[in-house]
Image (spheres, helix red, strand yellow):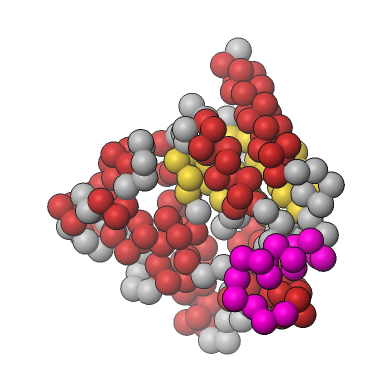
Amino acid sequence: MTVIAIEGQAGSGVVDVARAVARELDLDFVDRLLLAEIARRVGATVEAVQDSTLRTPGRGERIISLVQRMLERSSVGGAAGDPYFGPGVDTLIARPYAEMNDSPVTSGQELDEQHFIATTAEVIRDVAEAGNAVIVSRGAVAILRDRPYVLRVGLVANEEDRARRILSRYQFENVEMAEGYVYQSDVAQARYFERAFGTDPLDPFLYHVMWNLSEVSDEWAAARIIDASGALTGRALR
């Protein structure tokens, strides 16, 4: 079983590297958008979950099976206890760190945030338990740090390179706006890690390895992650 958790700074190249690793190893690529899609489907019937929009090439049936197990544990499936997600949490999961910068103002918002953190962690643990996935962002490296079979990777880059990558990918008018996005994302990511895990996203003890993508290429980093995952898997089997 292969599971790789990757956390990266906005604009560092984390998504490009993670997709390359997932493609090379034929693993599911699980990011905030897929988690949000799962959240939307949790309130649906099992038949609706079979919709092809949730499927990923080559491994879609496994993801659908995972969602069905989620449904069985939710109120929709008739199980006792709270469902994974409440209304609107899929929208929260889909938001990038840069859009999650506001602190709770009321006790109700505080409870909502705590529930969001807890249920997101629960889904990530289930995805990891199912195996054969690259899980990107949302603190998966912290959530799964007690799983010896999960390779935990951190990716960073300098602010100038990150702003240039953001500028080339999104509809920002100038580099100053991209730099503002990078700054806002860093603040929000740090706040999320502090609230959820009591640590910092740059804490080296969260990771097996961390690479600076201003110093190495995306291709080099992807290859080294594949090497490291093979070594960790081999060690776990001994």
Image vertical order of residue 136 relative to residue 43, above or below: above
Q: Is residue 37 shown left or right of residue 124?
A: left
Residue 220 position, x and y percent, is: 73, 37
Residue 73 shows in this picture: no
Residue drawn at x 69%, y 39% as measured from the top left:
219
Q: Nearer the viewer, residue 157 or 72?
A: 157
Q: Nearer the viewer, residue 159 or 67?
A: 159
Q: Nearer the viewer, residue 13 or 153?
A: 13
Q: Is residue 140 shown left or right of residue 63?
A: right
Main secondary structure of the magenta stretch: helix
Residue 154 shows in this picture: yes
**Which quadrant of the structure image shows residue 208?**
top right
Residue drawn at x 53%, y 77% as measured from the top left:
110
The number of numbered badges drawn on the structure is 0
Q: Residue furthest top?
A: 238
Residue drawn at x 72%, y 49% as measured from the top left:
155
Residue 131 position, x and y percent, is: 45, 34
Residue 127 position, x and y percent, is: 43, 43
Residue 25 position, x and y percent, is: 52, 31
Specify the segment rendered in magenta.
159-174
Residue drawn at x 47%, y 36% as measured from the top left:
27
Q: Is residue 118 magenta?
A: no
Q: Is residue 11 shown left or right of residue 159?
A: left
**Which quadrant of the structure image shows residue 238?**
top right
